[in-house]
Amino acid sequence: MSFNGEATSDVPTLPGTHSGIPPYLLDKARRAKDGVFDTRTKPVNERRRSVAVPQGIERDVFLKALAELKEQLGGQHVEINDKPLVDGWYMEHPNTHDMMTILDDEELVASAVVYPGSTEEVQTVVAWANKHRVPIFPISMGRNLGYGGAAPRVRGSVTIDLGKRMNKILDINPDDFTCLVEPGVSFYALYEALKEKGYDHMWLDTPDLGGGSIIGNTVDRGVGYTPYGDHWACHAGLEVVLPTGEVIRTGMGALPGNNTWQAFPYGFGPYSDGIFSQSNYGIVTKMGMTLMPNPGGYESFMYTFPNEEDLSLLIDIIRPLRISNILENVAQLRHVAQSVAARGLPRSKFYSGDGPVPDSVIHAAAADSPVGDHTWAYYGMSYGPEQFRAYKLSLIDAAFRKIPGTKKIDPATLPEDEYFWSRDRIAAGVPDIHELRWVNWTPNGSHIAFSPVSPIRGVDATALFALGKKYHDKYGIDFFPAFCVGLREMHLIVEIVFDRADPQRRREALDCLRDMVDEAARLGYGEYRTHLVLMDQVAGTYSWNDGAIMKFNEKLKDALDPNGILAPGRCGIWPRRYRGRGWEMTREKGIVAEGDGVSDE
Amino acid sequence: MSFNGEATSDVPTLPGTHSGIPPYLLDKARRAKDGVFDTRTKPVNERRRSVAVPQGIERDVFLKALAELKEQLGGQHVEINDKPLVDGWYMEHPNTHDMMTILDDEELVASAVVYPGSTEEVQTVVAWANKHRVPIFPISMGRNLGYGGAAPRVRGSVTIDLGKRMNKILDINPDDFTCLVEPGVSFYALYEALKEKGYDHMWLDTPDLGGGSIIGNTVDRGVGYTPYGDHWACHAGLEVVLPTGEVIRTGMGALPGNNTWQAFPYGFGPYSDGIFSQSNYGIVTKMGMTLMPNPGGYESFMYTFPNEEDLSLLIDIIRPLRISNILENVAQLRHVAQSVAARGLPRSKFYSGDGPVPDSVIHAAAADSPVGDHTWAYYGMSYGPEQFRAYKLSLIDAAFRKIPGTKKIDPATLPEDEYFWSRDRIAAGVPDIHELRWVNWTPNGSHIAFSPVSPIRGVDATALFALGKKYHDKYGIDFFPAFCVGLREMHLIVEIVFDRADPQRRREALDCLRDMVDEAARLGYGEYRTHLVLMDQVAGTYSWNDGAIMKFNEKLKDALDPNGILAPGRCGIWPRRYRGRGWEMTREKGIVAEGDGVSDE
């Protein structure tokens, strides 16, 4: 089996809504001369395919069940996945798999993709799945890049693509600073709606890439870069279809005739929202989100620091400033290698050798960038009226200048296309996709994330940096570290960029990740989120008291999903009928899909 | 059956730790000449009592089971509740019942109180309860005044008084601004510890009354008055004993050797903390809490507004200021009647007639207070350096002065004992108990709360004010309303003060509450928290989609607590074996304790 391996710029026209990116930006992407986004499209793989029938059900029975579902939802809303797989994240194509697959692309594929148009139709699909014991895997828009994209955890699952038809902004409340959205509403879409209505007094918060679903990002506990960056903490109210088909509304949503569903998150009694994040206990069909008041002014700033060893002191300087909200958004300290990659140029332009690009080459490549010959870049934003910003920026400046050689970059000197301006937009709540340029680093560029949580301490930053470097060197992978300080903790975020058409590169990337996860856990660092293929391993590191939390999670799973149909294996939680049956992936075995359903005719 | 009905000042000496109030304050309380706290002690009721054996178990079998538990925990840690009940919230007495009972004091009583000294001993008690099918009711310190105090929901439950022996501050981290506490740590105790260590860079947040448990308040989703006032949102990490006896640690606590349990709340996988708030799914034995950075300055302010009708415009003025954090803490708008009551003088000093005290009398009583002849008082705090405060206070001043006749009160004119200074302390994170003075309003003063959630809108404030007034008038009860604006919602907080020795006054208070809860729900307003005896009713108002949320809650309950031993009925959640068996209280029946166990020998 093989990939074609060549990029193409033949991007079909498509509606912007489903892609999550507005049409004007798609146009811009299509016209881009620097190759940005080109690698986002994968050529059609012409090998013939048959449907990946889920384990434990006969092909004929399964196809008959799908026919039944077509009758219930309408034939056009049930798409059988029997055509060649097509990548391309801003194209109108079915969400059949992970467009950045770390495994062979035939591994984590859906047997079919269904498009419910309402909560009732989601219930219909759930009832159907229970009747036929078919694993279903809900996605909002399938843009969970670096963490599995649109792929289901169990091969042959029926993917419920919620976002294609359920993409309405149901409410924007300009008095309460809240909104209510369906799964298909992207950060871009909400941003556009706020602009269209002239609601300049409200900001949204956006993650690094704005093309994804607000619900999808939030229930996966993704983060953004304004003071409202903790998306989970900022949501208010869920509507959830349970694995047995009932619909609940959480918080005040459970009170008939209420007018506070989005204004007060808790309601009365157990606050159950949290168990619907990073789990497989329910399908979120509506979510409330709070919006940030326009802070009355904002101002991006950038500092660079000369030496790799400055990291330790710098992190200790950042900690009290961040906790005290002098640094008001996620503090980002990015390594020069990451800045170079974010420019969107291929690695081959700088280096043609094997193994990691040498430091000297990275520094040479950065010479004409604002990072220059320095090693670390800090991107930040100060909010509020001018006199507030001046005060806070003066404290920050005094603190950062304790690092010898620190440079403050004057934004006025930076060209329009500089990465700084992407950070500026995002920290001001303007969705962007510049960040993704780093995938141009390799042909068929894809990325997968390592993101351990640690205290905000120089000693921890140094340990994690060394850990990452050690295993990247071992596997000959370029190391792009960035430290993101949430509030009282930090994440090292390492995106491994790899050629998804090259099985060996994929394997090296995955092995490197697995080694890093294990060693991080030995040191007391755990992942805050992970890719589908690493979920069992990561969940296994949260093993205190003989794995008590997983036993608890499994008890909830069995109670809520007795037939084990909803997203089996997501976040490492397997329903009873899947447990201990060899579903766990290992690096030796790769992904295993037992029984029938795997064919390559 | 009767109460003695007379207050006494015979307050025994006791260690401060268990009461939650430091000794110096107890001394002050004892010496107080104005009667404050005197009504907190109830004279011994001399009627002889027998143990309130829980329903469904024979007395002999139960007493034998208790003997077994004594062998396991040590006899001194299992106290059988067979002596006359004694009130008094700062005395060293067993937490056998609600010291502010709204029912006859023999209704919601424990059969015994046990004092585990460790998480392992909590597990021992849970295993014992499962073995003998005995309902157990965990409390932290039993200071949930106005919401049921220390009482169990089911008569004859064995109360687990966690706080008596598990009262350690396990960690204070001055770098991360976090702490880890056991159930017996009060807001006072943590405050004292911070002072003792000289950690002036960290503040805690305290609710109106500082003598209660941090864990107890937080898991009941109580609030305070600094920017860290949403205690639930500010906690980080739980240790929980499940109803089947296993121990879990949530968030990063599930990762062995982690050093981020209190720094990052979420961990990996389902975020399950929320289901342990306002529920009966587990016993919280440790909790992490984040601490607020010293804001570098603070300044209390007070405004008064002349007319009852100013409420509507005022609330609409407050909304954007609060959401934008110009008003930086819970916005409190208190009615003059509430200010008068908070002075701690008895109603009889002002009025001897029946029915509610007339407005004219209230205004006369307030004449020499800062509220004067005005109707509403706003208590607020501005934080940060002087120039920050000046800017925000100028915006607030301009906005508030849109109400004709608005007065800004100069704190320098206020005497040391003015209620303003209690608000000032609390908004600066200094625990206080002044608020409780309002119980002096009646003999044997007790209080019970009505606290519906609404949008921050003039029209809603007006509707809720009218609703409260209507039913207080109907039952002849003095109306003490205060509006507390959280962030995007507000709570009307009404404390009904009643003479708990007078069965008719108790009944009127309860009937008034039940009527208000029902009518509020018809208008779309729901309680955020409620008293034990109202939990079934309030839970019943959250009935969307045929009571879907309660069916969901019950499904979790049955999965986690198959024997139905943990706090049956708390927040309206009954285990299977209790459901549909007439446990629900009605105003006709009062509280029902079926079967044996109720005796008054």
Image (cartoon, coloured by chain):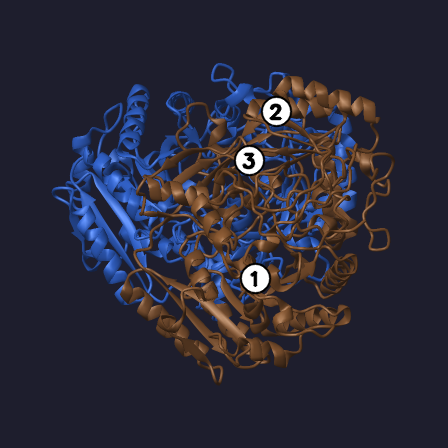
Chain colours: A brown, B blue
2 or 3: tag closer to the N-terminus? 2
Q: Quadrant of the C terminus of chain B?
A: top right
Q: Are marks 2 and 3 in contact (CB under 8 Å)?
A: no
Residue in view at x 60 percent, y 44 percent: B273
Residue position for label 2: A76
Q: CA distance from mark 2 to mark 1?
A: 47 Å
x and y percentages locating residue A72 in the rendered image: 64, 18
Closer to us: mark 2 or mark 3? 2
Where disc 2 sits, the SS reads: helix
3 or 1: tag closer to the N-terminus? 3
Q: Is residue B104 in sight in this rendering?
A: no
Question: Callout 2 environment at 10 Å: few (<14), some (14 to 19), or many (20+)?
Answer: few
Instruction: Mark 2 vs mark 1: tell me if same chain.
Output: yes
Query: The disc numbered 2 marks a residue on which chain?
Result: A
x and y percentages locating residue A486 in the rendered image: 52, 60
Mark 2 belongs to which amino acid? Gln
Q: Is residue A141 in sight in this rendering?
A: yes
Q: CA distance from mark 3 to mark 1?
A: 32 Å
Query: The disc numbered 1 marks a residue on which chain?
Result: A
Where disc 3 sits, the SS reads: loop
Mark 3 belongs to which amino acid? Gly
**Which label sits on residue A163?**
3
Closer to the camera in the image, A478 or B247: A478
Where disc 1 sits, the SS reads: strand
